[in-house]
């Protein structure tokens, strides 16, 4: 990484905006539903949060929890047909929900941009890489063809693509997964956005490349004083790369806190279950993975009460009847939606019960089987030992 700004326009714009007060992004009660033949899919159901300039927010949740729809809804990237959207999105103090397409196009790339979940389908398969990056620069910054190509080359160097000159004239299918992801980052950074959405930027990459890509996004954020929204299903990914974490379940925000506070004192059993589902490096080999039982709810007919209740080991009758509101925890920036949070008397008692039951199961499993027949030379022993 060079340490110099990528483009003349981007960092300067970001620095000017930095002088303004107030959060960069203020989302209030954002709802995004889709009309389908099966009924209304409540993909995002009343989400509110703010993001300060230069900060990184992680949005975490299982597949289908609404992370991508939320990000696209904030950016105004969803088609209007069959979509019901309400609420408010203030970007640099300006309402951007329901901006006309022409206005939204002006924002995309230059002020907000997105590294999409799947680079193979997001990159144009029939346009050379250099031209794809150049088009965005020409459109938003009015660069000449030659200047756009030179800047595209610099961007590819900055995202550390090997042999950047060669890549300019290649197509997406000629690049490896890691290289395509780097091209997506170069494209997203091209016009110096103030806010970058990175939607699962490391899925399908091997662990070493994952770490490099996350480090790259972090470096770009610091160099450009850019805010980042890092979307992932993996709590481990956001742990070292964000200032705050927001956990989503069934289209709702269920817990949000500064990253250190969340890991020190998580409240939602769902967040805890997400954490336990990450394999640990020091686990012995063949250790069973902890999976969250059951499946995420149907967003057309979500369960009554807390939508996690059918899968939650701590659920009580109240959970199945009343949806818990967002409550502020001991830390003023920590909110969660749960009737019986981690550390509460019910949670402690139930955890002890579950641990005892698990201990019993393990003990039974370890009991040596009582042989009911003597060792035999025949191939099959028909008597049961279990
Ligand atoms: N255009 C659409 N029409 C109907 N339902 C949709 C549409 N787009 C998304 N959904 C539904 O909205 C829900 C949330 O989808 P979303 O893509 O935001 O999930 P996600 O959290 O990003 O999951 P993943 O981790 O798999 O990317 C899903 O149930 C999905 O099927
Ligand atoms: S409200 Fe009840 S069901 Fe929901 S997460 Fe908390 S304990 Fe579990
Ligand atoms: Mg997604």
Image (cartoon, rainbow, N blue to C red):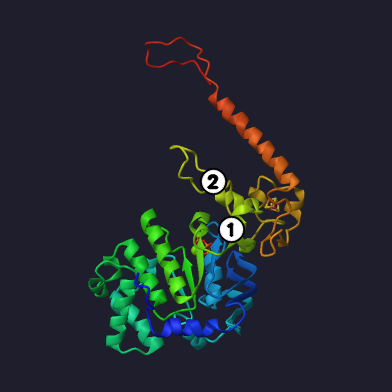
Q: Judge whether residue 150 can be spotted in this image.
A: yes
Percent coordinates x, y for residue 60 in the rendering: 55, 60
Furthest residue toward left: 166
Front residue of 4/158: it is 4
Percent coordinates x, y for residue 228 in the rendering: 50, 70
Q: Quadrant of the N terminus?
A: bottom left
Examine the image and state in which quarter residue 85 appears: bottom right
Foreground label between 2 and 1: 1
Q: Which residue is mark 1?
A: 260
Q: Is residue 104 left or right of residue 253?
A: left
Please say if 207 is above or below 172.
Answer: above
Front residue of 30/195: it is 195
Measure the alpha-carbon separation of dots 2 and 1: 24 Å
Q: Judge whether residue 206 can be spotted in this image.
A: no
Q: Determine contact: label 2, label 1, CB under 8 Å.
A: no
Percent coordinates x, y for residue 217 in the rendering: 43, 67
- At a point 71% along the width and 58% down the height, the residue shown is 330
Percent coordinates x, y for residue 219 in the rendering: 42, 68
Q: Which residue is mark 2?
A: 291
Furthest residue toward front: 3
- At a point 28% along the width and 75% down the height, the residue shown is 128
Disc number placed over residue 240 in the picture, else none: none
């Amino acid at each position: 990484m060079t340490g110099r700004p990528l483009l003349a326009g981007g960092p300067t714009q970001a620095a000017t905006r930095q002088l303004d007060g107030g959060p960069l992004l203020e989302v209030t009660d954002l709802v995004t539903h889709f009309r389908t033949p099966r009924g209304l899919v409540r993909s995002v159901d009343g989400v509110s949060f703010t993001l300060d300039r230069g900060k990184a927010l992680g949005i975490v949740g299982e597949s289908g929890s609404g992370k991508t729809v939320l990000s696209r809804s904030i950016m105004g990237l969803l088609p209007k047909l069959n979509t019901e959207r309400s609420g408010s999105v203030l970007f640099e103090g300006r309402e951007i929900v329901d901006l006309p397409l022409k206005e939204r196009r002006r924002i995309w790339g230059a002020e907000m941009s997105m590294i999409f979940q799947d680079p193979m389908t997001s990159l144009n398969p029939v346009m050379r890489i250099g031209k794809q990056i150049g088009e965005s620069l020409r459109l938003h910054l009015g660069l000449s063809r030659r200047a756009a190509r030179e800047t595209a080359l610099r961007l590819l160097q900055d995202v550390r693509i090997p042999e950047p000159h060669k890549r300019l004239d290649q197509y997406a299918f000629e690049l490896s997964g890691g290289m395509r992801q780097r091209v997506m980052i170069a494209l997203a950074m091209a016009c110096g956005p103030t806010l970058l959405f990175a939607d699962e930027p490391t899925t399908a990459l091997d662990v070493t490349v994952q770490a490099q890509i996350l480090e790259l996004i972090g470096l770009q954020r610091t160099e450009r004083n850019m805010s980042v929204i890092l979307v992932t299903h993996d709590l481990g990914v956001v742990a070292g790369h964000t200032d705050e974490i927001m956990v989503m379940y069934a289209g709702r925000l269920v817990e949000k806190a500064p990253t250190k506070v969340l890991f020190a004192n998580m409240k939602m059993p769902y967040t805890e279950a997400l954490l336990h589902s990450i394999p640990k490096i020091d686990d012995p080999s063949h250790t069973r993975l902890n999976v969250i039982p059951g499946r995420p709810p149907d967003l057309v007919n979500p369960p009554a009460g807390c939508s996690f209740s059918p899968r939650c080991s701590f659920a009580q009758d109240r959970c199945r009847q009343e949806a818990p509101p967002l409550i502020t925890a001991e830390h003023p920036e920590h909110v969660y939606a749960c009737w019986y949070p981690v550390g509460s008397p019910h949670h402690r008692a139930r955890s002890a019960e579950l641990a005892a039951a698990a201990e019993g199961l393990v003990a039974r499993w370890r009991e040596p089987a009582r042989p009911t027949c003597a060792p035999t030379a025949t191939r099959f022993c028909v008597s049961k030992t279990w």
